[in-house]
Image (cartoon, rainbow, N blue to C red):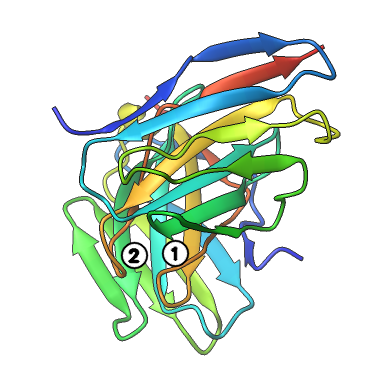
Amino acid sequence: DQQVKQNSPSLSVQEGRISILNCDYTNSMFDYFLWYKKYPAEGPTFLISISSIKDKNEDGRFTVFLNKSAKHLSLHIVPSQPGDSAVYFCAASALGNQFYFGTGTSLTVIP
Amino acid sequence: DGGITQSPKYLFRKEGQNVTLSCEQNLNHDAMYWYRQDPGQGLRLIYYSQIVNDFQKGDIAEGYSVSREKKESFPLTVTSAQKNPTAFYLCASRYRVGSPLHFGNGTRLTVT
C-alpha cells in the first residue's frame, strides 16, 4: 500500500512562472519530509526537507509547505528555470528509519 | 571528494545467476539503504542497515540479501530467487536520524 502518493505524473510550466508539485501521505507517524530531484540514469539529489514541527521551509527558489491536518505537502519553485526540468520525488520518514517515496512528478519547464 | 560509489553502472546477467552490486561510501554515514526503481514506480526499499553487522528488511526484500561488515560498504546480492530482477538499483546513506538520504548514481541491472 502506497504511503506516499504523487497523483500528478507530469507538470508543464512556463519559464519564470511558479511550479507547484504536490504530495499526499497516509501515515500520521511521519515526522520528516523531503523532496528530491532526479535526472534519468542518475541518483536522486536532495533538494529540501521539513520536519513535522514546521509548516514551511525555504531555500532559495524552493519552498516546501506542510499541512499536517490534510497530510499534504507541496514544493514551490519560483521562478522556474529550464534546468529545473527533471523528475521530483517526495519522501517521508517516521523516526528517521525507513524512507518512503512517492512515484514522482516529471516537471518540464518550457523556455 | 566524499560520496557514494556504486559499481558497475551497467550490469548484465543470465537468468539463474546470483549477482552482487557494490556500494561504498566515504561520508562516515552510519545508515545505508538499498532501493529499487522500476518505470512508473517510486523508489521501493529493499534493505537498510543502521549500524555495522545489523540490517533490516524493507518492503521488497524477497530474493535479495545484504551484508554490512564495514561501515563504508553495503553490498546487495540479487539471487536467482528474485522473480523480476531487471531494474535500476540505488544505494543511499544517511548521517544520522533527522538528516536526508544521499544517493549514489545507481546500477542498472539487466537479467535475460
The chain carrying label 1 is: A
Figure quadrant of residue A43: top left
User: Does the CB distance between marks 1 and 2 fall below 8 Å?
Assistant: yes
Q: Position of residue A17 (x, y in %)?
A: 34, 45
B63 with respect to A34 (left or right): right
Please rate how many residues cluster around mark 2, counting C-alpha atoms within 10 Å: few if below 14, some from 14 to 19, many from 20: many
Q: Position of residue A1 (x, y in %)?
A: 77, 66
For the residue pair B90 and A10, the one nearer the viewer reads as B90
Mark 2 sits on what residue? A64
Q: Earlier in the sequence, mark 1 or mark 2?
A: 2
For the residue pair A62 and B54, the one nearer the viewer reads as B54
Say if labels 1 and 2 share a chain: yes
Q: Which mark is residue A74?
A: 1
Amino acid type assigned to the residue bearing label 1 in the image: Ser
Figure quadrant of residue B6: top left
Amino acid type assigned to the residue bearing label 2 in the image: Val
Residue A11 seen anywhere in this rendered image of the structure: no
Residue B21 seen anywhere in this rendered image of the structure: yes
Q: Residue at x 55, y 84 (%)?
A: A70
Q: Residue at x 58, y 51 (%)?
A: B47
Q: Which mark is residue B88?
A: none
Q: Position of residue B78 (x, y in %)?
A: 68, 31
CA–CA distance between discs 1 and 2? Answer: 6 Å
Relative height, residue B83 to residue A11 (above, below)? above
> For the residue labelled by badge 2, is the local secondary structure a helix, a strand or a loop?
strand
Relative height, residue A46 to residue A92 (above, below)? above
Of all residues shown, which one is farthest toward the left? B1
Relative height, residue A53 to residue B9 (above, below)? below
